[in-house]
Image (cartoon, rainbow, N blue to C red):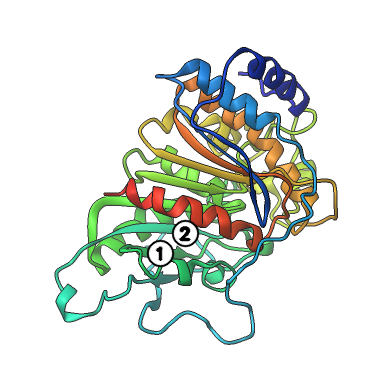
């Protein structure tokens, strides 16, 4: 399917909204982060309603709500906020022939994991993937994950995925430099099952920003490995930009990745289009049947530059235009939570995390 521009999607949205009602949606619920719209889309069972849900989302404006969410996240003060009775920092052995720049992993155990009464209890696992500007343990520093997971009976695993100039894009690099996907899916996943008391097959995966690319692609490339996926403000279509003809020197600055050169990661976007398609979430939707999909984003607004800005969040929201349409066309159910406006930072990521976590964990039972 040819990717829509945001303008084309908006026109379709207006038409569809006029023709059919939305499905299981709450539009414009007021919160301290701005108006929030939540939709549940099931295109196979309710095709007209699914189109209306898509239209409802595409009609949302990219405009500053003027509100800033209250966050109870730890702050980077130099002291590690992760409680010692729950946090385990380890290094995963790297097999010969597998290349990564960092093999560290932080595991956040459920409360009571080490108690004698729970010695035989097993737990589902949720993998948390970092963004391009965050370290692997950033979840426990910048998000509310420590606080809100107090009652979760699940093991949370945060593997290193590279950041900054060595942001791994959760891919086996086209030029052979790194093997992030192989390391995470073929090495880290079984290592977690051997090292901790896990429930076989009860795995979910979540990613913010760059991590959302990894979360969706890992689920698509590895059938039945993950039962549920959470995408928070991700670049969910790496080609649905202004012209539709993406070059790495355009994509990088637009998405504010300081590095690496994406030609090293996925090859030339024209000559090696098959590689780009394989790592583009919007081109992998057909492989997501049966996976619980939770999609969250802000619509952003024209304001600021760089990663932590409304402009950046707006650019990422625009990539959802094609991604959500592809899900609808392929008959793949999803649930989405979209906030009007918003900046691309953890203060705005926490509310979507709180909304999605119970649904993600329920899918692992």
Please determine whether, in this image, residue 101 is positioned above or below residue 223. Answer: below
Whether 313 is drawn above or below 269: the answer is below
- C-alpha gap between disc 1 and disc 2: 6 Å
* Left/right of residue 258 with respect to residue 54 in the rendered view: right
Q: Quadrant of the N terminus?
A: top right
Q: Foreground: 364 or 213?
A: 364
Which quadrant of the structure image shows residue 7? top right
Q: Secondary structure at mark 1?
A: strand
Q: Earlier in the sequence, mark 1 or mark 2?
A: 2
Q: Residues within 10 Å of mark 1 (few under 14, many from 20)?
A: many
- Total labels drawn: 2
Residue plotted at (59% across, 27% down): 54
In the rendered structure, find residue 157 and report the number of the disc placed on it. Answer: 1
Q: Is residue 271 visible?
A: no
Element at label 2: strand
Q: Are marks 1 and 2 in contact (CB under 8 Å)?
A: yes
Residue under label 2, please give it: 128
Residue 208 picture location, percent across and down: 57, 54
Relative to 29, does residue 344 appear above or below in the rendering? below
| Residue under the point 37% across and 60% down | 188
Task: Give x and y (percent) for residue 244.
Answer: 74, 28
């Amino acid at each position: 399917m040819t990717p829509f521009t945001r303008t084309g999607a908006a026109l379709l949205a207006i038409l569809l909204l006029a023709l059919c009602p939305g499905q299981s949606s709450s539009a414009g619920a007021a919160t301290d982060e701005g108006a929030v719209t939540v939709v549940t889309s099931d295109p196979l069972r309710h095709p007209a309603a699914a189109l209306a849900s898509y239209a409802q989302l595409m009609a949302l404006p990219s405009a500053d709500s003027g509100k800033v969410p209250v966050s109870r996240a730890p702050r980077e003060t130099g002291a590690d906020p992760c409680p010692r009775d729950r946090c385990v920092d380890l290094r995963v052995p790297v097999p010969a022939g597998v290349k990564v720049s960092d093999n560290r992993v932080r595991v956040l155990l459920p409360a009571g994991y080490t108690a004698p009464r729970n010695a035989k209890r097993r737990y589902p696992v949720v993998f948390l993937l970092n963004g391009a500007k965050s370290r692997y343990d950033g979840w426990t520093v910048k998000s509310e994950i420590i606080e809100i997971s107090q009652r979760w009976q699940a093991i949370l695993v945060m593997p290193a995925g590279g950041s900054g100039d060595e942001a791994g894009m959760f891919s086996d690099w086209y030029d052979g430099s790194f093997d992030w996907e192989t390391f995470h899916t073929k090495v880290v996943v079984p290592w977690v099952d051997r090292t901790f008391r896990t429930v076989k097959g009860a795995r979910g995966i979540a990613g913010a920003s760059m991590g959302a690319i990894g979360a969706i692609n890992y689920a698509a490339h590895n059938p039945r490995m993950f039962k549920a996926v959470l995408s928070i403000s991700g670049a969910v279509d790496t080609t649905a930009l202004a012209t539709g003809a993406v070059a790495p020197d355009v994509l990088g600055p637009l998405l504010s990745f300081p590095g690496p050169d994406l030609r090293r990661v996925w090859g030339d976007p024209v000559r090696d289009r098959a590689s780009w398609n394989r790592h583009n979430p919007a081109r992998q939707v057909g492989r997501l049947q049966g996976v619980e999909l939770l999609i969250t984003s802000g619509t952003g607004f024209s304001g600021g530059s760089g990663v932590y800005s409304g402009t950046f969040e707006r650019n990422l929201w625009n990539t959802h235009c094609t991604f959500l349409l592809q899900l609808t066309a392929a008959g793949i159910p999803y649930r989405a939570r979209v906030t009007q406006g918003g900046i691309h930072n953890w203060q705005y990521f926490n509310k979507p995390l709180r909304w999605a976590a119970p649904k993600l964990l329920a899918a692992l039972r």
